[in-house]
Amino acid sequence: MLRRRAALALAPLLLGGLLAPPVGAANADPGRRAVPQVQLTSWSSYADLKAGRRAGLKLGRGQVSLLAPAPRTVAGKAYEAGTWTSPWAAPGFDATALVPSWEATTPGRSLVRIEVRGRGADGRAGSWDTLADWARTNRPVPRTTYSGQADDLGRVSVDTWYATSTVSAWQVRVTLMRPKGSSLAVSLERVGAVASADASAPRPTSTPGPGVGTVLDVPTYSQMVHSGHYPQWGGGGEAWCSAASTAMVLAHYGISPNPTGVAAGHADPVVDHTAKMVYDHGYDGTGNWAFNTAYAATLVGGDSYVTRMRDLREAEDHIAAGVPLVVSVAFGRNQLTGAPISSSNGHLLVIVGFEADGDVVVNDPAGATNGEVRRVYDRAQLERIWIAASGGTAYVIRNG
């Protein structure tokens, strides 16, 4: 059930974060709505990627790849590298956090490095901070994030870059690397980041919309049946809510990779496999939001990203379009009626539909068995713990 500390998340488009007084404020007005403060900018098309600055890369249709790479050393290993740097993105408000997301092809022993930096209101640009070294194959450099790096304008915390105070603009830089002397076709297809202020304040329960009465056929996988599996990937059980949820969404699209490195006889070995493929060796867990969607992006034919939503009404649009959502919640005792666990400081589950009255049908991987994963949660309760815990964080994984 553990994901990690609550953090900001990604958005697929410019979204309106409906802000109110801080959580728990005694005078909080449940009807108050403030100015939206979340915006994602991303680059994926030929025109988008052309707008960035390239060094050692060539521009193709919907991707950049190595052309004239320069030497680079990472963890004592020799690579050939090229970089793509985004234009400055100004969200139009004072942002306090950035969360990048990306889609990349990293065959063999190639990898990508993701860096971000901010610019203050005074126009001063901060230093580049390394958020992650990522590869689908996890070799030879372990897939990892670099928490810390507290410096001039911000710091890194797993998949999130937090501003020291606020920033008015930001950039993302991606370095593509392959072993020296190789010809591996490492490429970047999409990168972006959401800039956001706090969006976890209370708000009125949303009114049911177009998703009511729709329940998607999403297979059920329990994380708990994997308790004790593979300590090197988190140990299963309560640690694998994210991996189990991602595996369920992929299975909904008929995607079930052949498990590698998993012993025979394990129930639903695709969950063990997913845990291995999303494991963050810097954070020591499987709950890195961007690592889950970056992995899913290598398997689906559509977009895969992390987003934030204002409420369950926005989630209904995805369900109506046939897209299940992995959402990040946290709750205490008596805050989520019918949950298989009494509380959690960080948990992910899959929204698969809505009943006629607007209550939420979920696949909650904390169920003790696969047969106990499907649940129905009260709309107001789930929406409240989703917004308060993570500002409405969701993985959106589309196929085709």
Image (cartoon, rainbow, N blue to C red):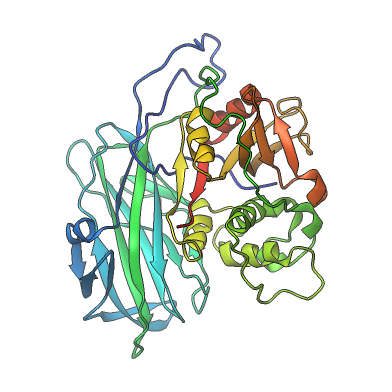
Quarter of the image for residue 65 reads bottom left
- Residue 6: where, in percent of width, then height? 55, 39
- Residue 54: where, in percent of width, then height? 19, 67
- Count of number-bearing discs: 0
Q: Is residue 124 above or below residue 358?
A: below
Q: Observer-nearest residue: 47 or 17?
A: 47
Q: Observer-nearest residue: 356 or 119?
A: 356
Residue drawn 37% across the image and 61% down it: 114
Q: Can residue 158 be seen in this view?
A: no
Q: Can residue 377 be seen in this view?
A: yes
- Residue 83: where, in percent of width, then height? 26, 68
Image quadrant containing the C terminus: bottom left
Residue drawn 71% across the image and 28% down it: 336
| In the image, farthest residue toward the front | 213
Q: In this view, does 255 lie above or below 357?
A: below
Taking 333 as reference, is 248 left or right?
Answer: left
Taking 50 as reference, is 63 left or right?
Answer: right
- Residue 242: where, in percent of width, then height? 62, 52
Residue drawn 51% across the image and 58% down it: 291
